[in-house]
Amino acid sequence: MLGLLLVVPNVAFVVLGYIRHQSRPTTVSLIFNAVVTLLIVIAVNALVRRLRPVWALERGELLTIYSMVAVGSAVVGLDQLQTMLPVVAYPVWYATPENDWESLFVREMPSWLTVTDPDALWAYYDSRGPLFATPYWRPWVRPALLWSAFSLTLLFVMLCLNTFFRRNWTEEAKLSYPIVQLPLEMTSPRRTIFLDRLFWIGFALAFVINAINGFHEIYPQIPSLLGSRGARYDLGRMIHSRPWNAIGWTPLNVYPFAVGLAFFIPVDLAFSMWFFYLLWKALKVFSSAAGWGDLPGAPWIKEQSFGAYMALAGFCLWASRRHIAESVRAVIADRELDDSREPMPYSWAAVGVIGGIAALMVFCQQAKMTFWPALGFIVLYLLLSIAVARIRAELGSPVHDLHFIGPQVVLTETFGPATLGKQNLILFAYFHAFNRAHRSHPMPHQIEGMKLAAETNTSQRGLAVAIMAASALALVLGWGLLLDAFFRNGGGGWSHKGREAFSLLERWLTSPGDPNWYATGGVLWGLAFTVFLTWMRTRYVWWVFHPAGFAVSGSWSMALFAPSILVGWLAKTLILHYGGMGAFAPASTLFLGLILGGFSAGAGWGVSGILMNRRMYNFLP
């Protein structure tokens, strides 16, 4: 109950921060408002323990609250609900005689997935009044309920899949889950970081840097420090001659909290992330020098990254094949298999995956999608989800965005718009709502919560109920808060995500063209190269290039994080080389302090911006 109560202000913080152009917590793997909430609860709990020990929360309860807040925040995050509403609201309002969308696709859209009432759309875009000031909120209820049901079904299927992966990843493969090391250390009963001097040095350093950068936003005469978003050191702006200017946007900022996150990434992955990031830049220069600029999408970095994610998902399934097969055989043959420590019985999980996919298929077919495109989309999306969860569980990448290359784009490029048909393409445009990017993906937060429960002997089944309850509450609150905000402020200011989806649909329908063999080749090459990297990694001990580094390094977010990852990798390498593991453990508290100090200062500026209704310093890149 306390977790659900705390989901409410955290959802409000995520949503209002987006509306008032503050920090966007869900763009980073470790959601900072969940960590700061945990810090506040720990402080209050310490006071309660002194006054009324029987009321104090245990470690497992603290981490359950953290997991609920993290999942709830992800559900309403920038690449989830905050994209869904602008996409759902966009097509009818922006259909004009000039673009002829009415005859092109609006007439054939499923009316139950969008809002067609002109008064309701006027209230959303132009009324500038509270949500319930007029009756025009009512037409929004049906699409809100239907899309929420779709989202909850997806979340439940992810939870069922995580049930099959949890024991293998956590207890057998013993993956390290670097992202949740800070919550674990904050609640550790054996060694409290809050009594460690190095922790407070790191905390103070990051806090002061972000405090000064924040005051620079208010008083420009105060200089900003390294890591400020205002200090945009962009190498791409300094290079003007061809082909070197093809590197494009190349920021050189270093962020203290990102250095702290990078310190807990395995050394080979951190090296691979910044190495392949530089390799992508070199590929852009080579592509320009070779004269490939006229080829659409060259050098197909997004497509190669998507292929790499698919290969990683395949390896996840292959590595877990015995455990999954054992679970499935137990379900089919009704054999005894101890699943009492799992989030749900394996039989329930199997039924949940099959039934959930079937329910999603019914949703798609009711929207007039044909069978194979709908099934292909759902399968590719779940494979992508598995890959993201595995990358986080094993390696702790701080970002995994894959901008503008969701399953719907890959299917359209592979088979061609004309082959797929208008109805499938219309739904693909709507699916942009949760495939624009994948930074705030909920699935890894679910399995990280399971890891925290395993560390504290907390009931996995109780956690599963808590996670789904937090997800449902977050969806209800998120729809209500976002609609109210758009009614008050005018939804047109946040409509660009809808424009992206339906402008792409317009291009598919007006210039369908043939299958894009270049893009398909990029996907296949990315998949094949990831297979090669994995084969080399398993065959040769000296091979330092990690396939996950290749997958995540080509993204937009990696440009922001690569310098910080380089600094964190260098610090960790030097500490391990000269001090060994004996120096690593105490040094790690310094980097934990960098994370928490940056998060605390950033949360303070975020809350100030929301309360004062003015743009404050955003510490996130």
Image (cartoon, rainbow, N blue to C red):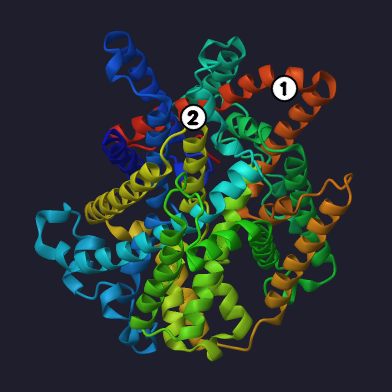
Disc 2 is placed on an element classified as helix
Q: Is residue 182 above or below residue 291?
A: above
The quarter of the displayed image where residue 70 is located: top left
Residue beneath label 2, please? 599
What residue is shown at x 53% (from left), y 16% (from top)?
Answer: 192
Q: State the mark number for residue 509.
A: none
Residue 103 in picture, x, y percent from top left? 35, 90
Residue 96 in picture, x, y percent from top left? 33, 80
Residue 32 in picture, x, y percent from top left? 46, 35
Amino acid on which disc 1 is placed:
Phe
Looking at the figure, which quarter contains the C terminus?
top right
Amino acid on which disc 2 is placed:
Phe
What residue is shown at x 68% (from left), y 20% (from top)?
Answer: 585
Q: Is residue 588 above or below residue 606?
A: above
**Camera-side residue of 321 and 361:** 321
Q: CA distance from mark 1 to mark 2?
A: 23 Å
Task: Answer yes or no: is residue 386 visible.
Answer: yes
**Camera-side residue of 257 and 102:** 257
Residue 329 in picture, x, y percent from top left? 55, 65
User: Along the horizontal axis of the image, is 461 left or right of 283?
Assistant: left
Q: State the mark number for residue 584.
A: 1
